[in-house]
Amino acid sequence: MKSPVGTPLSLMVSVCTLFALLLVGGCKSEEKGRTASLPPPLVGVMTVEERNVPVSFTYAGQTEGSRAVEVRAQVSGILMRRAYDEGQYVKQGQLLFEIEPDTYRAALRQANGVMEQAQAKFTQARQNLNRVLPLYKKNAVSQKDRDDAQAAYDSAKADLDSAKAAVSEAEIKLSHAYVTAPVAGFASREYRTVGNLITAGSQDGSLLTVVNQNDPIYANFAIPSPQFMRLRALQEQGRLKSDGTVAEITLADGTVYQTKGVITFIDKQVNTNTSVVAARAEFVNPDLFVLPGQFVRVTLSGMELVNAILIPQQAVIQTQKGSMVVVIGEGDKAEMRPVDLGDNYGDSFLLNKGVKAGERIVVEGGNKAVPGQPVRIQQASVQDAKLPDQPVGTGSDSGKAE
C-alpha cells in the first residue's frame, strides 16, 4: 500500500528539477544571443603611401692626418742637434736636425779643390789644342802631335766633368746634413736622440721623426658589404638619389664638428677578413681642431630614397614567424601579412616589401583583429604624422677601415 505522503513529495522534487533545467537553458540562450550581437572590433587604420624620404647613414670611424711623412736621414753621421720642439707645428722647409754638417762641408771644400785642379788642366789642354790645330793644317806639326793634343783635351774635359759631379754630390750631402720638414704640419717626437750614429738607408737607424699634416684631415670608416651592395642596387634602380653626399663627424664627447666634409674615397673591393668596404671623408681643418687618431662617428647625408614606404613601428606585430602587420582587405576583413622591414626612420620603419602603396594597415588595435573576420575601421591618429625635420641615421655601425 502506497504512503499518502510519498506522492506529493515526489511531485515537488520533480517540479523543482524541471524548473532548474528551464532556468539554466534560458541563461545559455541569453548569453549566446548577446555574443552573436557583439559588433566587430574597432581598429585605427592608415593608407600606405609612397614618398621620397631623406636618409642618412652613420658609421664608426677614426681620423687620420691627410699626410704622415716620415723624416729620414739621407746621410750618415752623428746627430748633432734637434732644432724643433717635439709636437711643434713646423713649416715646410723648416730645420729639424743637423747631422755632422762640418764633415760634409769639409768634403765639399775638398771636392771644390779637385774641381779647380781639373779646371786648370782643362784650360791648359784646350789652349794647347788651339795652338796645335792651326799648325797641323800648315803641316807644321805631325799627326801624332795633333792626336796627343786632342786626347789631352778630351781627358781633361772628362776629369773636369767628373770633378763638377763630385762637387754637386758634396753639395747635396751637405744640404742633407740639415734635415728639414718636407711638408707643413706637426712634428712628432724624435726617434733618435742627439749623439747617436745615424745610418742612412737603414730601416731602423734612419727614421728621425714624423710630420703629420692635419689640414685637411681624413676620417676613415667602413661600410658593411651587405649594406654597400644594397645601396648600390638602389642607385642602379634609380631609387637612391643624391645631389651631393655630405659628411659630418661627431667626436667621442658628442661634439659635432661644424665643417662639413666630402667623400674622397670608396674602395673597389671588400675586405675578406672583416667583410667591409673601406671609405674616407675629407674635412678642412684650418684651426687644427680635429686631431689624428680620434675615434668619431661619420654621418653621411644628402641622399633621398625615392618612392619609399614608411610604416609606424606600432603597426608591426612580432610573432614567432617574424614581423607581421594587419592588412584590411575586401569587406573590411583582417589579414595577417609578413613584412620585410628595413632601417628605422624616426618612429617608423622603412619597408622593403610586404605591403603595397594604397593598401590599408592597422595601426591601432591590431591585437583585436581576428584574421578573416571583419573589423570596424577609423582613421588612425598617426595618419597625419610628419616626417622628421632631419633625416634619422639609418646605417649600421662598423669598425674603422682596415
Image: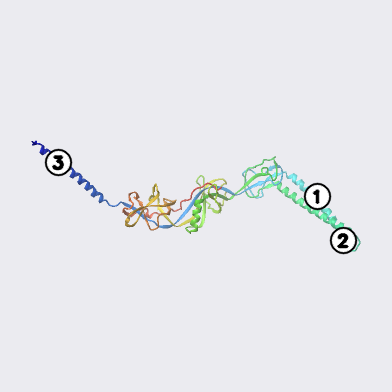
Q: Residues within 10 Å of mark 2 (few under 14, many from 20)?
A: some
Query: 207 or 401: nearer the eye?
Result: 401
Give the left or right position of residue 13, taking residue 105 as reference.
left
Q: Of the numbered discs in the image, which one, if any, rests on residue 133?
A: 2
Q: Is residue 158 visible?
A: yes
Q: Which amino acid, mark 1?
A: Val
Of labels 2 and 1, the one closer to you: 2
Secondary structure of the residue carrying numbered label 2? helix
Q: Label 1 near label 3: C-beta < 8 Å?
A: no
Q: Is residue 83 visible?
A: no
For marks 3 and 2 on the same chain, the one whose residue lies earlier in the sequence: 3
Q: Residues within 10 Å of mark 3 (few under 14, many from 20)?
A: few
Of labels 3 and 2, the one closer to you: 3
For marks 2 and 1 on the same chain, the one whose residue lies earlier in the sequence: 1
Give the left or right position of residue 182, taking residue 252 as reference.
right
Percent across and percent down for residue 286 are: 57, 51
Q: Label 1 near label 2: C-beta < 8 Å?
A: no
Q: Which residue is mark 1?
A: 114
Residue farthest along the right direction in this orientation = 140
Q: Which amino acid, mark 2?
A: Leu
Query: Looking at the image, which residue is at 42% across and 58% down?
Result: 50
Measured Cα–Cα span from mark 2 to mark 1: 29 Å
Measured Cα–Cα span from mark 3 to mark 1: 147 Å
Query: 149 or 299: nearer the eye?
Result: 149
Q: Quadrant of the N terminus?
A: top left
Q: Which residue is mark 3?
A: 14
Secondary structure of the residue carrying numbered label 3? helix
Percent across and percent down for residue 168 are: 75, 51
Percent across and percent down for residue 78 are: 71, 42
Residue farthest along the bottom direction in this orientation = 138
Percent across and percent down for residue 176 are: 71, 48
